[in-house]
Amino acid sequence: AREAYVAARPASRALHERARQVMPGGNTRTVLVYSPFPTAMESGEGCYLRDIDGRDYLDLCGEYTAGLFGHSEKRIHDAVRAALGRGINLAAVGEAETSLASLVCGRFPSVELVRFTNSGTEANLMALTAARAFTGRDTVMAFRGGYHGGVLLFPLSGTNPATVPFPFVMADYNDIEGAVSVIRENADRLAAVIVEPMLGSGGCIPARLEFLAALRKATAEVGAVLIFDEVMTSRMSGGGLQQRLGVTPDMTTLGKYMAGGMSFGAFGGRGEIMGLFDGRIAHAGTFNNNVLSMAAGNVALGKIFTAEAAETLFDRGEAMRARLNDILARAGTVMHFTGIGSMATAQFRAGPIERPAPPTPEEEALRELFFFDMLASGIYLAKRGMIALSLPVGEAELDRLAAAVADFAEARAGLLP
Ligand code: PMP
């Protein structure tokens, strides 16, 4: 299989050789690189991709959720072209910034005031900065296996990768007792608890409602700021997963698809916390309100991904996951997909899965096999086996995915637990 992969991609292979001469690891985005070399893409249309060797793929990676609108949504393209027609960044505030902020505040229950950034990472860094300033405390609590950005990666075991720029404590995801006791033990120094209402990078593992409710209660008791990182999960309803679950944090961070696929991040929350940015603390950034993101975001949120569109996509994703899991259960394997709505991740151990665990070598091998088998059948997933549906994915594409997963279960039956 590896030989076939290599033989089919001479251009990707040559590009990787060149790339390694000028970038350590051959890239600037670690998640996209794998052995023996990554498939390099040349173009995309709708929910399809073409690689630089001319092979086509059904794109179910969906740019790790940022590609919600697909590659060629006309209204997004038109908005970006129109913005370009008015000139690249103008070093000034503008109409589109205020209207996008109004859209965001109107949709997310916890967001009374909002500010924009270039990425989800920055949004989280700024939200944590706000919480630390607001409380006058220094420590942040996060969950093992949580991912909040390039420098905010919390390990499954051991201590920290030395990138998190402030003191922090950790607990296990979905462990109510453990989390509440860490919050109480650190009451005096705890500025914020940051949590994804479904672990995204950690494997599309949903939080239990009681877990989020317990965090809500315990943070309120000790005066710490509860931050929901909805960078990935905001697609789960018009007002994010928080609205679907009915739990309202003090602050929320956003990103990914919200600017139609242009670079984007946002952090927002209660007026008394966000109000600090009225001049008492600064929040700078050359590209925070860049005209392309602001223009595309208005169309993306205002015209295309309406609350109704979010419901439709959610239902489509639920149906997809049920269908795939039915196929796998009938094939007699423990392999299954976790997730909510339009996001799913392949798991190679029996469920229910409450929190991520370091993968066994067998799981690692199966994950890789699944990725390369899907690629061979013309389906591009995130390397970790994650699917993020985009709006252009239709019934024909879902049929194709179901058939490919059924083929995988049959062809690899001897290897699957
Ligand atoms: N938070 C979560 C939950 C994410 O999934 C990501 C990105 N995968 C980030 C934050 C960081 O966003 P960005 O890559 O835009 O910095």
Image (cartoon, helix red, strand yellow):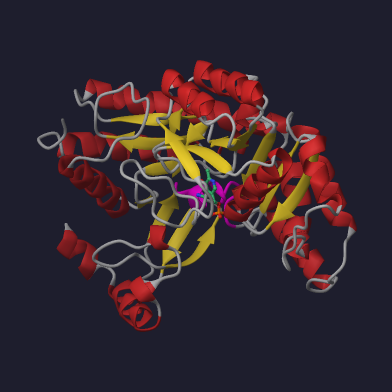
Q: Position of residue 189 (x, y in %)?
A: 58, 37
Q: Who's the residue at 88% across and 62% down the image?
A: 93
Foreground residue among 252 and 231: 252
Q: Who's the residue at 34% across and 41% down the image?
A: 156
Establish if 214 lies above or below 49.
Answer: above
Query: Would residue 75 be visible to someone looking at this image?
Result: no
Q: Main secondary structure of the magenta part?
A: loop
Q: Who's the residue at 42% across and 56% down the image?
A: 162
Q: Is residue 102 left or right of residue 318?
A: right
Q: Is residue 396 left or right of residue 2?
A: right
Q: Residue furthest front?
A: 188
Q: Which residues are magenta?
A: 60-71
Q: Quadrant of the C terminus?
A: top left
Q: Is residue 374 left or right of residue 231?
A: left
Q: Who's the residue at 80% across and 46% down the image?
A: 276
Foreground residue among 355 and 333: 355
Q: Is residue 98 left or right of residue 52?
A: right
